[in-house]
Amino acid sequence: MCRTPAGGDMALGQHRIEYEVIEGWEQMPEGWAFVEVAGVACDSQDRVYVFNRGTHPMIVFDKEGKFLNAWAEPGRGPGR
């Protein structure tokens, strides 16, 4: 679960952020994997957004690690 300092809507500025890495927390679709995770964010509904450099750049999970959605799939054709 994600919480912002002092129960606010957003964490801005410099804060001491403590976190714990839980191996295997994420429940990814078969064959999916993270590649160089560059950022993680949480919203007010405790959804966890993970940006990575893999085939599925933005992946969304619930607070228990269940896959919810993904977007920003690689394009096809000109300008991809």
Image (cartoon, grey):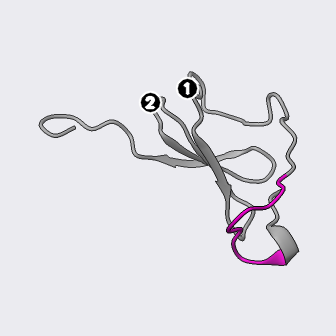
Residue 78 disc label: none
Decide which of 14, 67 is in the foreground and name it.
14
Residue type of the residue flagged with mark 2: Thr
At a point 87% along the width and 41% down the height, the residue shown is: 20
Can you identify the residue that label 1 sits on? 35
Q: What crowding class fits label 1: few (fewer than 14 Cα within 10 Å), some (14-19), or many (20 or more)?
A: few
Q: Could you tell me residue 44's position as x and y percent?
A: 71, 71
* Side (left or right) of 20 relative to 76: right
- Is residue 5 shown above or below 74? below
Which residue lies most toward the top here? Answer: 31
Q: Could you tell me residue 29's position as x and y percent?
A: 60, 32
Label the magenta part by its dominant secondary structure: loop
Q: The N terminus lies in which quarter of the figure?
A: bottom right
Q: The C terminus lies in which quarter of the figure?
A: top left
Q: In the structure shown, which secondary structural element does the residue marked by tag 2 occupy?
A: loop
* Side (left or right) of 40 relative to 35: right
Residue 55 disc label: 2
At a point 57% along the width and 39% down the height, the residue shown is: 38
Residue type of the residue flagged with mark 1: Val
- Assess whether mark 2 and mark 1 are in contact (beta carbons under 8 angstroms): yes
Q: Magenta segment range?
A: 7-17
Residue 59's image quarter? top right
Distance from Cα at disc 1 to Cα at disc 2: 8 Å
Number of marks in the rendered image: 2
In the image, is residue 14 part of the stretch drawn in magenta?
yes
Q: In the structure shown, which secondary structural element does the residue marked by tag 1 occupy?
A: loop
